[in-house]
Image (tube, helix red, strand yellow):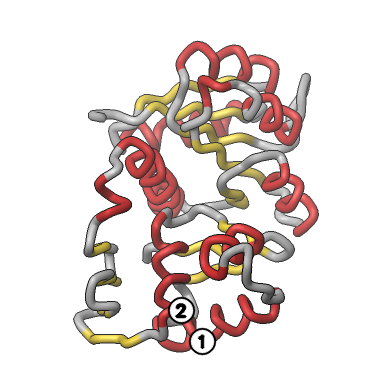
Amino acid sequence: MSQYKILIVDDEPDILEFLSYNLKKENFLVEVCSNGKDALVLADKIVPNLILLDVMMPEIDGIETCIELRKNKLLDNTIISFLTARGEDYSQIAGFDAGADDYITKPIKPKLLVSRIKALLKRVDLKNDDTDESASEIVGSSIIIDKEKYLVYKNNAEIVLPRKEFELLILLNSIPGRVFTREEILEKIWGDNVIVGDRTIDVHIRKLREKIGDNYIKTIKGVGYKFLDL
């Protein structure tokens, strides 16, 4: 895919102009609209790769818009991220419950926003390229994971991880920026036949952070965890 299509939905004209300008500079194809009702129509028409969605909007608010967008089968592979000044935990949880892939709070510097968007769009590539899942080596900007040798390299330094910590890192790093819920982690790492509690996940996350660094794994309170490809 040569260019990604991004739909920005916000009721503030200055925000739309600012975001559109900075994303077009990065060679993204950008469409904008100012309310949730128009967003549903435009998204169905252009089928964007990613939607940036404000929470507080006229006509239909962002949460309800996200719920409706997720009902559209044409948008199954579309990434939805909230971009809003509402940073409360309950607002973020509502966003993830509505089907969002990420929740970004304003204000945010353009370079950081572009970095977050590029990380989210890796999920599109993974869905369209099955070879990514079977690759023996996962290369990030600062971490390399060798799945065959069960080794991790950070800035060329070798890190040896126990099996579960290694599998947890592979899962989180498979889609950088994407939030994995506790339920997903339990199912994919420990399976349905093994009974473990939330404390088990917390302990493994803590140990993983001690070895690779605190900044790579972010806790989304009440939801789960996501990996940041720094």
Nearer to the camera, 7 or 72: 72
Residue at the extreme left of the image, as rendered? 156
Q: Residue at x 42, y 56 (%)?
A: 176
In the picture, measured across the screen, residue 146 lies left or right of residue 210, that is left
Q: Which amino acid type corresponds to the residue marked 1 in the rendered image?
A: Lys
Q: Where in the figure is residue 102, as x and y percent of width and height?
A: 57, 48
Q: Residue at x 41, y 87 (%)?
A: 211
Residue 79 shows in the view: yes
- Where is mark 2, residue-wise? 165
Q: Where in the figure is residue 127, as x and y percent of width and height?
A: 38, 39
Q: Where in the figure is residue 37, as x and y percent of width and height?
A: 69, 17
Q: Name the disc covering residue 140, or none.
A: none
In the picture, measured across the screen, residue 156 lies left or right of residue 46, that is left
Mark with earlier residue (2, 1): 2
Nearer to the camera, 60 or 32: 60
Question: Residue 130 is drawn in which quadrant?
Answer: top left
The relative height of residue 158 versus residue 99 in the rendered view (above or below) is below
Q: Which amino acid type corresponds to the residue marked 2 in the rendered image?
A: Glu
The relative height of residue 199 versus residue 171 in the rendered view (above or below) is below
Nearer to the camera, 120 or 130: 130
- Count up the numbered dots: 2
Nearer the camera: disc 2 or disc 1: 2
Q: Name the disc covering residue 207, or none.
A: 1
Q: Where in the figure is residue 43, as x and y percent of width and height?
A: 54, 19
